[in-house]
Amino acid sequence: MILVSHSRGGVTATAAANARPDLIDRIVYVLDVGTSADRAQAATWGRIPKTFVRLDADASLPPAMQDRLIREGNALTPDNPYDVRTLEGSHLKWLIDPAPAARVLGELAALTTRSA
């Protein structure tokens, strides 16, 4: 199963990955705005392949902050870094124009199927 989260949904996705990593084949964050209280655990979340989809024009979570979150996640699990993808647009544009995001998710599904 590929678990996809957007924005504050990343908190729930991380909690699910911490609780049941055995049920998740890949976790995809489209802007994870979790806080330090929502931290992932290296022993659980850290063993799941993960992707961070950056949105290059997001004002609510600017690209520099997205990059910081990616660096922090990679520091926690250096042997399992994020696969980073970037989409053009803002916080909600990927929902209004879903074709680019659908292509990325299709690519990730193919990768996950091959590695499973």
Image (tube, rainbow, N blue to C red):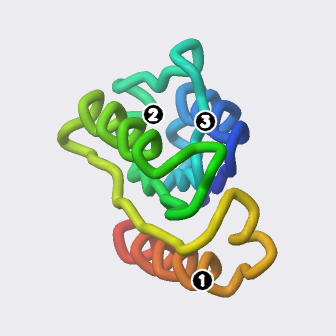
Structural crowding at the residue carrying mark 3, measured as other residues with C-alpha within 10 Å and reported as few (<14), some (14–19) or many (≥20): some
Of the two numbered discs 3 and 2 on the same chain, state the one appearing first in sequence. Answer: 3
Q: Is residue 116 left or right of residue 4?
A: left
**Camera-side mark, 2 or 1:** 1
Residue sitting at 26 percent across and 45 percent down?
Answer: 80
Q: Residue furthest left?
A: 79
Quarter of the figure that contains the N terminus: bottom right
Q: What residue type is labelled 1?
A: Pro
Above or below, comparing residue 104 to residue 51 in the picture: below
Q: Where, by quadrant of the figure, is residue 88 drawn?
A: bottom right
Amino acid residing under circle 3 = Val
Asked if marks 3 and 2 touch (Cβ < 8 Å), the reply is no
Three-letter code, disc 2? Trp
**Residue position marked by numbered label 3 in the rendering:** 33
Instruction: Give the mark toward the camera: 3 or 2.
Output: 3
- N-term-proximal mark, 3 vs 1: 3
The x, y position of residue 7, in whole percent, is 68, 44
